[in-house]
Amino acid sequence: MRIVFIGPPGAGKGTQAQRLKDYLEIPHLSTGDVLREACQADTPVGRQAAGYLQSGKLVPDDLVLEIVGQRLEEADCTAGCLFDGFPRTLAQAKALDRLLAERQTPLDLVLELAVDPQELFTRLAERGRDDDAEDTVRQRLAYYYQQTVPVLEYYEKCGLLKRVDGLGTPAEVFSRVVAAVNQQSDGTGRRETRCDN
Ligand code: AP5
Ligand code: MG
């Protein structure tokens, strides 16, 4: 299966994707993790991305698409993939459609993890990643509303979007994620999908 996790910063995309990766035995591709690793290793990609990550701005689409395109070439992705934090602009969503159409492996499901802003700020203040300072979280959230909410609307029109309540313990949220995935894979939750909007 090919599944996209979308949600605001701190919604639990990484937490849930890690669990689902073990459950479905398919790779987890977090563009944020790849970019942070590139920054730490001081690669050319990392040097280009570092300033964006630190300030909570979106990294340019072409850089992110290069990372995803390369990862999809790897053999383990033929079995499926969990996309976490990607796509987060309409241009990225349309490029992903093209990448997957070339491989005749379209998306099966888009899961929106819904969490209110107050809870997001609490979770990220407790975590304390480099980009978790309150002002940076505010910036990340602003990008989410401006650039990524239209992606949700895009997938809603495609009939691929399912909204999952992201509040509760990670285990409680995971049981909702699994229910949505199983509904999609056994056909009971399937709607007509048309991604040409
Ligand atoms: P990215 O790494 O994708 O960060 P994000 O979207 O801001 O989200 P987070 O990773 O902070 O949160 P999450 O939803 O994964 O939640 P998590 O499971 O960690 O992106 C970072 C940056 O990279 C961007 O700002 C941008 O610069 C760049 N970037 C990445 N992708 C890009 C793209 N496609 N295009 C352009 N730029 C891109 O959980 C958060 C915390 O909450 C953890 O401490 C966790 O333990 C806790 N938690 C999780 N679930 C629960 C729960 N149910 N209850 C209580 N606590 C919980
Ligand atoms: Mg994450």
Image: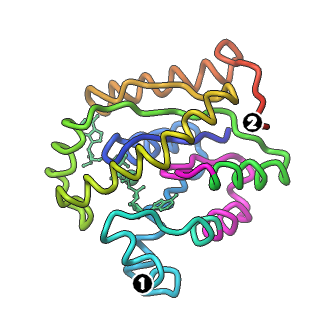
Position in image of residue 20 (x %, y %)? 49, 39
Write the start and end of the magenta stretch as one range: 66-90
Of residues 43 and 80, which is closer to you in this image?
43
The residue shown at (19%, 54%) is 127
Numbered circle sitting on residue 98:
none
Position in image of residue 130 (x %, y %)? 24, 67
Query: Mark 1 sits on what residue?
Result: 41
Q: Is residue 149 above or below residue 64?
A: above
The residue shown at (70%, 50%) is 94
The residue shown at (37%, 77%) is 51
Q: Residues within 10 Å of mark 1 (few under 14, many from 20)?
A: few
Tell me if 180 is positioned left or right of 12 in this view: right
Number of numbered discs: 2
Q: Quadrant of the C terminus?
A: top right
| Label pair 2/1, CB-CB below 8 angstroms | no
Q: Residues within 10 Å of mark 2 (few under 14, many from 20)?
A: few
How does the figure colour the protein chain or chains? rainbow
Q: Is residue 86 above or below residue 197?
A: below
Considering the numbered disc 1 on the image, is that residue within a helix, a strand or a loop?
A: loop
Considering the numbered disc 2 on the image, is that residue within a helix, a strand or a loop?
A: loop
Question: Quarter of the image holding residue 114?
Answer: top left
Specify the farthest residue to the top: 188
Q: Quadrant of the N terminus?
A: top right
**Gap in Å between the C-alphas at discs 2 and 1?**
39 Å
The residue shown at (31%, 46%) is 10
Position in image of residue 112 (x %, y %)? 48, 33
Position in image of residue 77 (x %, y %)? 69, 55
Numbered circle sitting on residue 197:
2
Q: Is 67 one of the magenta-colored residues?
A: yes
Give the residue type at disc 2: Asn
Give the residue type at disc 1: Ala
